[in-house]
Image (cartoon, rainbow, N blue to C red):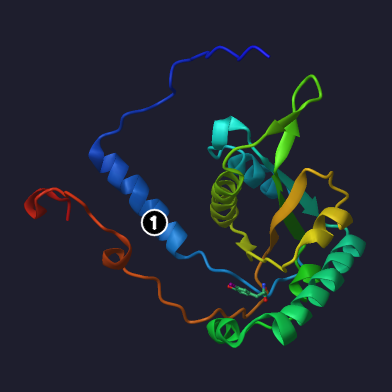
Amino acid sequence: MAATPPRFVPLDWNREPESVQLAAIAEFEAVMKRRRTVRHFSPEPVALELIERAITVAGTAPSGAHQQPWRFVVVSDPVKKREIRLAAEAEEKENYEHRFPPEWLEALAPLGTDWRKEFLETAPFLIVVFRLDYGWNEEGQKTKHYYVPESVGIACGFLLAALHVAGLATLTHTPNPMGFLARICGRPANERAFLLIPVGYPAAGTQVPDLVRKPLEDILVLLDGLPSEASIT
Ligand code: IYR
């Protein structure tokens, strides 16, 4: 099959003064610093448009060969949510009681989690993110997808940030093994569950673990950096 020739269009880009750049990143940093994983949701409904727009943002993520190997399934039907909860709790009960080694349980202890997943029914929306391990071209032939977990992981990052900016709380949940999600959501064979994200408003009085984020000096390594007097302080 002949390769598609490249086609280019002008980049849509505004060069801003550095003061504007700094103000923009400072504002975004302040917003993102307030993002927390929430495990207790209010049943209060959420406007579907907020979810659709956040998924639109997720769909702007870069992906291997621009194959966009993702699908976002939005579940709000209480019957489906219950089915997902029961299947997830069955896996998590096994995880917590038999499959997780002691070191894993120890690492989880500060989060206060257990196998019960009430939030899968209380949150008004569950977004099930599927990775598309392969696709089909116009001739119906299977096409390989490249860098699928990297691409879907980046899209999930965009999605979590967008939902937070939209004033919604999220939980990044992985009730492994997650095979039941493709079955319950009726997805085709090339789609595999990647992440399950309950979305909603936090329940009144929600508390979160008292976590501390690593400071910049612990996560940033400047190789061949500028001399210190030239850096922005
Ligand atoms: N998926 C389980 C266990 C769990 C694992 C990790 I790593 C976490 O950061 C949190 C939980 C659960 O959701 O309880």
For label 1, the SS is helix
- Indicate left or right for 226 with 192 as reference: left
Kindly identify the residue that appears in the image at 35 percent across and 49 percent down.
25
Percent x, y of residue 130: 72, 49
- Indicate left or right for 172 with 74 as reference: left
Kindly identify the residue that appears in the image at 64 percent across and 66 percent down.
171
Pointer 1 residue? 29
| Image quadrant in which the N terminus is located | top right
| Image quadrant in which the C terminus is located | bottom left
Up/down of 218 relative to 3, above or below: below
Residue 46 at least partly seen: no
Kindly identify the residue that appears in the image at 31 percent across and 41 percent down.
21
Percent x, y of residue 203: 68, 74
Up/down of 189 relative to 172, above or below: above
The one of 25 and 213 positioned closer to us in this rendering: 213
**Quadrant for ligand 1?**
bottom right
Kindly identify the residue that appears in the image at 84 percent across and 47 percent down.
187
Percent x, y of residue 6: 52, 14
| Label 1 near ligand 1 (CB < 8 Å) | no
At label 1, the amino acid type is Glu
Q: How crowded is mark 1: few (under 14 residues within 10 Å), some or many (20 or more)?
A: few
Residue 31 at least partly seen: yes
Up/down of 217 relative to 211, above or below: above
- Indicate left or right for 100 with 73 as reference: left
